[in-house]
Image (spheres, rainbow, N blue to C red):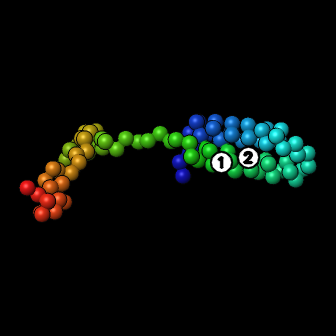
Amino acid sequence: MPRPTAAQLAYGSATVVLSTLAMLLLSGITSVVGIAVIALFALCLGLLVSVKAVRPRVSTALRPVRTSPASHSTAASVVPVVGPSPAAAENRIPASLRR
């Protein structure tokens, strides 16, 4: 499992603290059981927010490709990934719809 980013930790922590304070102030609960329930709910909410926070995406547009297996160079060249050919798109069109 990848480590959480700084943004995920910040969003989750802020959610736990702010939601706990808001719920305690708005509800007026003073019992230990009530405070524990609110704290548990705030922890679950903070976990949900931190998991759903946007993670940086790794670009898949470029990928490393080795030039030849006999090459002694360890550097890999970067080649753009090419999509399907236009001919492949024509093959998906039914013959009755082609001109």
Helix, strand, or loop for circle 2?
Answer: helix
Q: Check disc 2: other Cα within 10 Å, few if <14, some if 14-19, many if 20+.
A: many
Out of 7 and 33, give the one closest to the viewer: 33
What is the spatial separation of the Cα atoms under label 2 and label 1, in whole angstroms? 9 Å
Residue 87 rendering spot, x and y as whole percentages: 13, 53
- Residue 56, can we see it? yes
Out of 50 and 93, give the one closest to the viewer: 93
Residue 19 rendering spot, x and y as whole percentages: 74, 41
Q: Quadrant of the C terminus?
A: bottom left
Q: Please, what is the three-letter code of the amino acid marked with disc 2?
A: Ala
Residue 35 rendering spot, x and y as whole percentages: 85, 48
Q: Check disc 1: other Cα within 10 Å, few if <14, some if 14-19, many if 20+.
A: some
Q: Residue at x 91, y 45 (%)?
A: 30
Q: Quadrant of residue 17?
A: top right
Please say if 27 is above or below 89: above
Q: Residue at x 69, y 36 (%)?
A: 14
Whether label 2 touches label 1, CB < 8 Å: no
Q: Nearer the viewer, mark 2 or mark 1?
A: 2
> In screen coordinates, is 64 left or right of 97?
right
Closer to the chain start, of discs 2 and 1, is: 2
> In screen coordinates, is 99 left or right of 67?
left
> In screen coordinates, is 52 left or right of 16?
left
Residue bearing mark 1: 47
Q: Residue at x 56, y 39 (%)?
A: 5
Residue 42 badge? 2
Helix, strand, or loop for circle 1?
Answer: helix
Q: Please, what is the three-letter code of the amino acid marked with disc 1?
A: Leu
Residue 10 rendering spot, x and y as whole percentages: 64, 36
